[in-house]
Image (tube, rainbow, N blue to C red):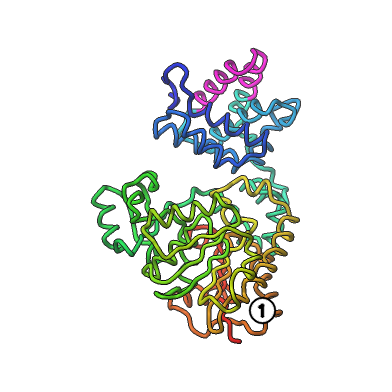
Amino acid sequence: MSRDKGRGKGLVSARELALDVLTRVDENKAYSNLQLNSALQRASLSSQDAGLATELVYGTVSRLNTLDYFLERFVTKGIHKLQPWVRNLLRLSLYQIMYLERIPPHAVVNEAVNLAKRRGHQGISGMVNGVLRNVLRSREKLVLPGNLSPVERIALEHSHPQWLVERWILQYGESAAEAICRANNEPPAVSVRVNTTMISRDEMLAQMKEAGLNAVASALSPEGILVLSGGNMALSDWYRDGQISVQDESSMLVGRAVGPASGMRVLDCCAAPGGKTAHMAELMEDRGEIIANDLHEHKRKLISAQAERLGLDSIHTITGDALDLVQKYAPGSFDRILLDAPCSGLGVIRRKPDLKWTKTPGDIGEIAGLQRKLLDSVSSLLRVGGILVYSTCTIDPEENEGTVRHFLETHPGFGLPEKSSAEWDKLDSAAGGVGVQILPQDYNSDGFYISRLQRFS
C-alpha cells in the first residue's frame, strides 16, 4: 500500500506535493530546494511523507535525462509535447519504478492515475495509466544499449549532461569522471560543526549518543561530527542554543586552512550565509575581529543571525561588492583573508541537483574571469606575512587551479606558505599543485577547492 494513502480531505499527499514542486521547477526554472522547502512548510505531512516527497523531488531532478530517455520509448507524441504537470507525473512515477524498490509498482501506477483524474480529464488519466502499465510490462526495455560511447553511457547511466561528462573526462579521466557522477546521485551526509567556544566535540558526541543518535567524529575536521541518523539537526536544541552548526565536512576545512588565531584581524570577502565566518571566530576563541562582507543586505542579516545564535561578538558584518573593499580598507590591514569566491557550484550537485541542468560551459569561463578580478583586488589588503585562502565549492580546474596559477604568475610577492598544519599537509600531499581539490567521491562530502597563499613582500 502507498505510504501517503489515508490522508484527510483537503490535505496534500507526498506525491501531490512533489508533483507541484517539480512542475514549478520545470515551468519557471525555479530552484528545487527552495520550492521544496517552502512547500513542506505549508503542508502538514508526517515526517515519513515529507521524506518521501523530498526523495521524489531530488531523485526525479537528479535522474532527469535518464527518465526522459526511457519515457520517450513509451510516450507516442514525445515527452516534451505533454503539459508540464503530466510530464512530471510520468517522470516521478518512472523514478519510483526504476529506483525505489520499496514501493510496489502497482501502487505507483494507482497513485499516478488518481492524481491524473483529479488534475485533468479522463483522456489524460487513461494515457498515464497506459504508459505506466506498458512500462511495467516492458521492464526489460529499461536498459541502456551496449553501443553507446563512454560519454553517452556515463551521461545516461548516472544522469548528467553530456558536455559536463565530456569536460570531466578530459580533466580527470574516464574512471574519475564516472565516480564524480555516481557520487553526485548519492544522498548528502549530515554533518555538524561543534561550537568549541561552548562545548568540546567529545562532550557533544556523548550528548548525542545519550539522546539515541547515531553520530561519529569526523575524520576530516577536528570540530566535525557526522550524524548518521537523527533527524534535522537545525531543529535540535543544540542548534538553537548555539552549540552546533550544520556544515559540510569539506566546508569545515576552509576555516582551518585560514588558520586564524586569537587577536587577529580577518577579512571574509564573500561571507554569506556565515558558516565559515563563524567557524573562524570559534577558532579565534571569539577574540579579535572578523569583517564579514556580502553583496546583499538580506544575506548580511543571515551572517549576523548566525553570529548571534552562536554567541560570537568578534564578527562585524558589512554590505558591498567585494571588488570595492580596497576602497574601504588600507592596504596590508588584515592578518588573514578568506575569499570564498562565487563559483559554478559544480561540487555541490548532490545538494542542488538542478545545477547540472542549468549550467553551461560559458558560465564557467565568465565566472572564472570574475574570480581572477576578485583575487587580484582583495590580495592588496593582506599584510606581508599574512595568509590568504582562496576557496570554491566547484571542481572545475579553470575556476580553481587555473585561477590561482594566474594569480601567482601576476603577483610575484605571493607564494605557497612556508609553514602549515599537519592536517593541511596530509590533504596537500594527496593533491599536489597549488591547492587541494576535493572531489565528491573522495570523502563522501561536497566537492571543494582550497588554496593557501602567503604574502612575502
As drawn, is 446 to the left or to the right of 27? left
Queried whether the magenta region covers residue 108, the answer comes back as: yes
The residue sitting at 59% across, 53% down in the picture is: 296
Q: Which residue is mark 1?
A: 408
Q: Position of residue 329 (x, y in %)?
A: 59, 72
Which quarter shows the C terminus? bottom right
Query: As rendered, which of 193 and 440 lies closer to the eye?
Result: 193
* Residue 296 or residue 49, whichever sits in front: 296
Q: Position of residue 225 (x, y in %)?
A: 37, 58
Amino acid on which disc 1 is placed: Leu
400 is higher (above) or lower (below) than 135: below
Q: Position of residue 62 (x, y in %)?
A: 59, 43
Query: Image height check: is 382 above or below 176?
Result: below
- The magenta stretch spans which residues? 105-131
**Label 1 element class:** helix
Determine whether 79 is above or below 169 in the image.
above
Residue, far left: 210
Q: Quadrant of the N terminus?
A: top left
Is 243 left, or right, of 420 in this rendering?
A: left
Q: Main structural element of the magenta stretch: helix, strand or loop?
A: helix
Q: Residue at x 53, y 35 (%)?
A: 56
Residue furthest top in the image: 122
Dot 1 surroundings within 10 Å: few (below 14), some, or many (20 or more)?
Answer: some
